[in-house]
Amino acid sequence: MPCKSDIKGRMCGGEGNLNSVYDLSGVANVDYKPGSVVNESYIGCFEDKKEGRDLPNIIKEGYGNYKKCFVYAAVHHYKYAGL
């Protein structure tokens, strides 16, 4: 579903264990895409498991704020971030 606080229509997961996953491998690129925060790319929406999660690290500093989430994930060299 679209993020409630983002006028650009960024996707932010959904009900239950749904995550909108973004690839952060383009973070090192200097040519940022318009509308991106750290040159992230939307991959798609995936259902996560309650145990043995695909994205095991919760970024509490960025919870509810996609910009803080992407920046924190990029600084800590995470390959993916989910909203």
Image: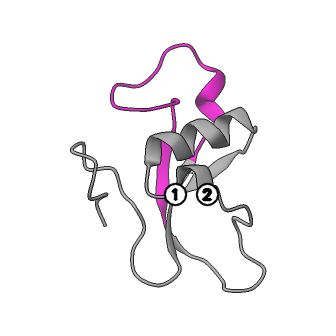
Q: Which residue is drawn at the image coordinates 56% and 13% (left, top)?
A: 30
Q: In the image, is 7 to the left or to the right of 12?
A: left
Q: In the image, is 28 to the left or to the right of 46?
A: right
- Which residue lies under the disc numbered 1? 63
Q: In the image, is 82 to the left or to the right of 74?
A: left
Instruction: Answer few, some or many: residues within 10 Å of disc 1's Cα (few below 14, many 20 plus, some between 14 and 19).
Output: few
Element marked by disc 2: helix
Of the pair 63 and 12, the residue shown nearer to us: 63
Residue 61 at x, y = what percent? 59, 50
**Image quadrant assignment for residue 49:** bottom right
Residue 25 at x, y = what percent? 65, 36
Spot the residue most to the front. 61
Q: Which residue is drawn at the image coordinates 65% and 22% (left, top)?
A: 28
Element marked by disc 1: loop
Spot the residue most to the top. 30
- Indicate whether 76 appears above or below 63: above
Residue 83 at x, y = what percent? 49, 59
- Circles 1 and 2: CB distance less than 8 Å? yes
Instruction: Answer few, some or many: residues within 10 Å of disc 2's Cα (few below 14, many 20 plus, some between 14 and 19).
Output: few
Q: In the image, is 6 to the left or to the right of 31?
A: left
| Kind of residue sitting beneath label 2 | Lys
User: Rounded to the nearest whole Å, what is the CA distance between mark 1 and mark 2?
Assistant: 5 Å
Q: Which mark is residue 60?
A: 2
- Indicate whether 26 appears above or below 4: above
